[in-house]
Image (cartoon, rainbow, N blue to C red):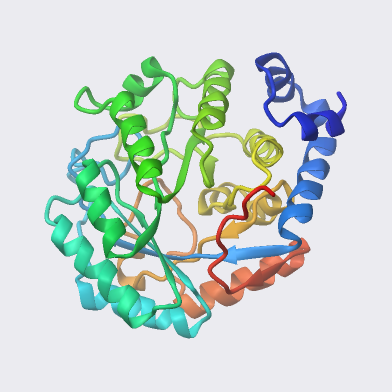
C-alpha cells in the first residue's frame, strides 16, 4: 500500500479503509506517515484546552455513560458561574487560552444561563476561545451561544450506524437528531468537533467504516475519538474495553484523511495505557485537554471507570502533561490554536 498515494487522495474508498483497519501490518508505516503529515501542517505544536466539567447531571440515559439519568448511584454536582470563572482564572494563569465547558444535558442549565457564563468568560478573558460540549440542543440555542461568544462546539456522533446507535441509546434519542445538530452547528459558523468511541458494545469494522465515511461527509474541524471504557453502573458493565491498538490505528487514519483537523489525545487513552496520550500524539493527535475542574468534583464526572487525573490540582495536570508531551517529541503551545485551513 502506497502511503504517498493515500496522502494525495485523502478520500479513501471503503476497500482501502477496510484493509487498514483489519490488518496490523500497516500500523508502523501508518503512524509514521500520520506523524509526517501532522508535522507538515502543525509542526511539533500540541495545543492545550482547559477542560471544565461543570455538571454531571444529565436528562439522557445513554447506556454506556456513568452520568446517565438512570444511574441512581451517581453523586450529582453542578458548578455555579463564579466557580466556573474561578477555574478559568486559574487556567489563564497557567497559560490556557481555550476553555472547554463540558457537561451533561442538565435541565437547570438554561440557554440564558449558558449564555451568561460564555459572555462572562469572554468579557474577563477576551483573548481566549470558549468551546462548548453540552449535547443536543435546538438550532436557536446554538445560535444564542454563538452570539454570546462560543466559537467551537464538540458533539461526538458516537456511531454513524442507526442500528448500532439504537443499541447504545434509549428510544428517546436518535442518530438523525444528532446529525441534525452537527449540521446546524456548521451552518451557524462554529468550528465543529465530532467523533466516536472505539470498541463500543456491538461495534463492528463495518460500523467503523461508516464512522469514517460520515466524517468525510461532515468535514469537521475537530475529531475526538477514544477507546470505549466500561462503567460499572451502566447496562454495559463488564463489557470489554476498546483496543489501544485500534484507537491508535484510527487516529493515524484520521490524520491522513483530515490533515488540518485538531485531534486530541484523550484522557481515555491515558486511562487504558500509562503512556496512551503520548502514543496518541505520536499516532497523529495534536491536542491535549487537562482538567481545570475543582478536585472535589473530578471523581464525580464518571463517564467511565478508573479515569485518571481525578486527584491532581490544575497546576499539577498542566506540569505533568507538559513533561509527557515533551517526552513524546512535541511541545505545548499556549495560543488559541485555531484549525488551520487548507491553502
Question: Residue placed farthest to the front in the image?
Answer: 343
Picture quarter containing residue 16? top right
Instruction: Indicate the position of residue 184 as horizontal and vertical percent values.
Output: 33, 39
Task: Decide if residue 241 is on the left or right side of residue 42.
Answer: left
Identify the residue shown where x is 67% and y is 40%.
Answer: 248
Task: Decide if residue 47 is on the left or right side of residue 21.
Answer: left
> Vertical placement of 340 versus 236: above or below?
below
Instruction: Indicate the position of residue 173 as horizontal and vertical percent values.
Output: 24, 28
In the depicted view, which residue is nearer to us: 37 or 23?
37
Identify the residue shown where x is 40% and y is 42%.
Answer: 186
Instruction: Indicate the position of residue 12 as horizontal and vertical percent values.
Output: 69, 24
Identify the residue shown where x is 49% and y is 59%.
Answer: 308
Instruction: Count how many numbered circles sit on residues in the image.
Output: 0
Identify the residue shown where x is 62% and y is 37%.
Answer: 247
Task: Decide if residue 91 is on the left or right side of residue 232.
Answer: right
> Vertical placement of 130 versus 124: above or below?
above
Quadrant assignment for the N terminus: top right
Q: Is residue 46 visible?
A: yes
Instruction: Indicate the position of residue 198 as horizontal and vertical percent values.
Output: 53, 33
Question: Residue placed farthest to the bottom in the image?
Answer: 93
Q: Is residue 55 visible?
A: no
In the depicted view, which residue is nearer to us: 173 or 142?
142
Amino acid at each position: 500500500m502506497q502511503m504517498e498515494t493515500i496522502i494525495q487522495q485523502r478520500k479513501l474508498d471503503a476497500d482501502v479503509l477496510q484493509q487498514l483497519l483489519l490488518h496490523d501490518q500497516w500500523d508502523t508505516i501508518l503512524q509514521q506517515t500520520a506523524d509526517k503529515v501532522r508535522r507538515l501542517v502543525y509542526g511539533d505544536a500540541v495545543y492545550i484546552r482547559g477542560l471544565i466539567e461543570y455538571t454531571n447531571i444529565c436528562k439522557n440515559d445513554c447506556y454506556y455513560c456513568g452520568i446517565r439519568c438512570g444511574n441512581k448511584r451517581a453523586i450529582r454536582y453542578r458548578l455555579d458561574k463564579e466557580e466556573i470563572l474561578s477555574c478559568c482564572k486559574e487556567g489563564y494563569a497557567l497559560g490556557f487560552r481555550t476553555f472547554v465547558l463540558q457537561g451533561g444535558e442538565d435541565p437547570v442549565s438554561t440557554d440564558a444561563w449558558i449564555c451568561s457564563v460564555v459572555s462572562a468568560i469572554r468579557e474577563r478573558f477576551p483573548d481566549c476561545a470558549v468551546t462548548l460540549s453540552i449535547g443536543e440542543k435546538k438550532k436557536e440555542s446554538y445560535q444564542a451561544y454563538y452570539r454570546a461568544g462560543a466559537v467551537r462546539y464538540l458533539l461526538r456522533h458516537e456511531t454513524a450506524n442507526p442500528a448500532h446507535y439504537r443499541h447504545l441509546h434509549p428510544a428517546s434519542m436518535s442518530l438523525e437528531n444528532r446529525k441534525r445538530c452537527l449540521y446546524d452547528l456548521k451552518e451557524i459558523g462554529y468550528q465543529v468537533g465530532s467523533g466516536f468511541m472505539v470498541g463500543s458494545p456491538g461495534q463492528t469494522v463495518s460500523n467503523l467504516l461508516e464512522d469514517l465515511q460520515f466524517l468525510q461527509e461532515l468535514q469537521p474541524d475537530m475529531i475526538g475519538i477514544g477507546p470505549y471504557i466500561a462503567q460499572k453502573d451502566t447496562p454495559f458493565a463488564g463489557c470489554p474495553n476498546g483496543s489501544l491498538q485500534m484507537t491508535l490505528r484510527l487516529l493515524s487514519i484520521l490524520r491522513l484523511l483530515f490533515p488540518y483537523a485538531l485531534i486530541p489525545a484523550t484522557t481515555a487513552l491515558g486511562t487504558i495505557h500509562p503512556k496512551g496520550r503520548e502514543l496518541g500524539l505520536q499516532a497523529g493527535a495534536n491536542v491535549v485537554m487537562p482538567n481545570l475542574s475543582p478536585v472535589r468534583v473530578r471523581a464525580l464526572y464518571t463517564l467511565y471507570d478508573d479515569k485518571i487525573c481525578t486527584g491532581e490540582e490544575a497546576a499539577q495536570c498542566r506540569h505533568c502533561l507538559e513533561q509527557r508531551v515533551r517526552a513524546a517529541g512535541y511541545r505545548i503551545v499556549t495560543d488559541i490554536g485555531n484549525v488551520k485551513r487548507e491553502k
